Image (spheres, grey):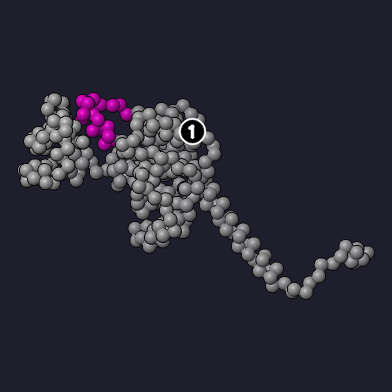
């Protein structure tokens, strides 16, 4: 379908710009000549009056259009630069851009393009819903060169495939776990995301890239994240519409301002207290089991006799 849209754009002389990702390779002569064997389903476009020759001409045409290189690491500045190049405009830096200590952070695996894009789409939709509030009124996507600010009172954790296996992501989560007043809300960014299982935690424990983390605490932090009901926010899905994403962004804004979410710090401490309590109960049970079995509780009359 994408190829069909490209063919239509070329035939109607639509002004076209190629956003070229770092790993993208433009079609060469051999690829174009063998396109039918490489993509046999292309014949289905004949139903829309698009033949093989039109497709091959479009493949060659791609190399002639204006190209904008997209950096490997997506950031707010990179997005502004690309938009500026496409529209021929510039944007003044806002207060939100200059803020050094955001109180609502979006944590994502920035090495994952889809996860990074999801973070910025969520940011764009959530800003108008939070501005003007007493808290969470200045959200920001956390960048690789930044630490979690002490001012953070909420963290939106973008859950994507393999995110918890990345050191930077794990380090941010550990920083969040040290803030008693920072609540956490998981955001599911992919249909294929699977909630961590016991096997997953065993795998994490043996990863050399995570050795610098306190792994027992890190695993507790991951488990604590999913004590909250996650919000599915997946812009790349074909079924996702502007209205649907906006509704989900409203849900996110409402939940982080509801006061019902707890911090990772609180959850981890509560779990430790429960474990300590369970251990204490075990010691009490052992003491009872070790007590002599021939003990007999005194009657009330015997107690009174001892007292007087």
Q: Is residue 135 above or below residue 216?
A: above
Image check: 223 left or right of 87?
right
From this viewpoint, which residue is outermost toward the right? 308
Identify the residue under disc 1: 254
- Which residue is at a point 36% across and 44% down the rendered structure image? 191
Q: Where does residue 102 sit, x and y in percent of width and height?
A: 42, 37
Q: Quadrant of the C terminus?
A: bottom right
Q: Quadrant of residue 245?
A: top left
Residue 155 in sight here: no
- Which residue is at a point 47% across and 48% down the rendered structure image? 226
Q: Quadrant of the N terminus?
A: top left
- Which residue is at a point 46% across and 26% down the rendered structure image? 132
- Which residue is at a point 15% across and 26% down the rendered structure image? 14
Q: Where does residue 275 sit, x and y in percent of width and height?
A: 57, 58
Residue 65 in sight here: yes
The span picked out in magenta is: 77-93
Q: Nearer the viewer, residue 170 or 248?
A: 248
Q: Nearer the viewer, residue 285 or 217?
A: 285
Task: Determine whether the residue tagged by mark 1 lies in a helix, strand or loop.
Answer: helix
Query: Magenta region, mostly helix, strand or loop?
Result: helix
Image check: 274 left or right of 25?
right
Q: Is residue 208 above or below residue 135?
A: below
Packing grade of label 1 (10 A; few <14, some 14-19, many >=20) is: few
Image check: 140 left or right of 178?
left
Q: Quadrant of residue 244?
A: top left
Q: Nearer the viewer, residue 200 or 128?
A: 200
Q: Where does residue 81 sit, x and y in percent of width and height?
A: 24, 33
* Numbered label tally: 1
Residue 299 forms part of the magenta stretch: no
Q: Where does residue 190 sit, x and y in percent of width and height?
A: 35, 44
Image check: 9 left or right of 176?
left
């Amino acid at each position: 379908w994408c190829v069909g849209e490209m063919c239509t754009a070329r035939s109607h002389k639509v002004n076209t710009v190629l956003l070229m990702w770092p790993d993208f390779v433009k079609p060469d002569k051999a690829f174009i000549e063998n396109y039918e064997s490489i993509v046999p389903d292309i014949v289905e476009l004949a139903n829309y009056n698009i033949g093989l020759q039109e497709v091959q001409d479009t493949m060659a045409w791609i190399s002639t259009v204006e190209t904008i290189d997209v950096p490997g690491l997506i950031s707010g500045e990179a997005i502004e630069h690309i938009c500026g190049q496409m529209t021929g405009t510039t944007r003044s830096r806002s207060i939100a851009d200059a803020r050094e200590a955001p109180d609502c952070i979006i944590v994502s695996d920035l090495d994952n393009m889809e996860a990074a894009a999801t973070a910025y789409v969520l940011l764009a939709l959530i800003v108008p819903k939070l501005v003007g509030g007493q808290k969470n009124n200045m959200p920001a996507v956390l960048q690789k060169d930044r630490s979690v600010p002490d001012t953070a009172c909420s963290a939106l954790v973008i859950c994507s495939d393999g995110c918890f296996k990345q050191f930077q992501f794990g380090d941010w989560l550990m920083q969040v776990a040290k803030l008693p007043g920072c609540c956490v809300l998981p955001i599911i960014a992919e249909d294929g995301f699977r909630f961590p299982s016991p096997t997953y935690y065993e795998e994490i424990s043996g990863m050399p890239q995570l050795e610098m983390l306190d792994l027992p605490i890190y695993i507790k932090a991951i488990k604590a994240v999913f004590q909250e009901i996650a919000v599915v926010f997946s812009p790349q899905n074909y079924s996702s519409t502007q209205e649907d994403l906006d509704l989900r962004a409203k849900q996110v804004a409402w939940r982080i301002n509801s006061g019902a979410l707890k911090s990772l710090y609180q959850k981890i401490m509560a779990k430790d207290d429960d474990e300590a309590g369970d251990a204490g109960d075990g010691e009490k049970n052992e003491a009872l089991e070790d007590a002599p079995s021939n003990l007999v509780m005194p009657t009330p009359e015997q107690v009174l006799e001892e007292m007087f």
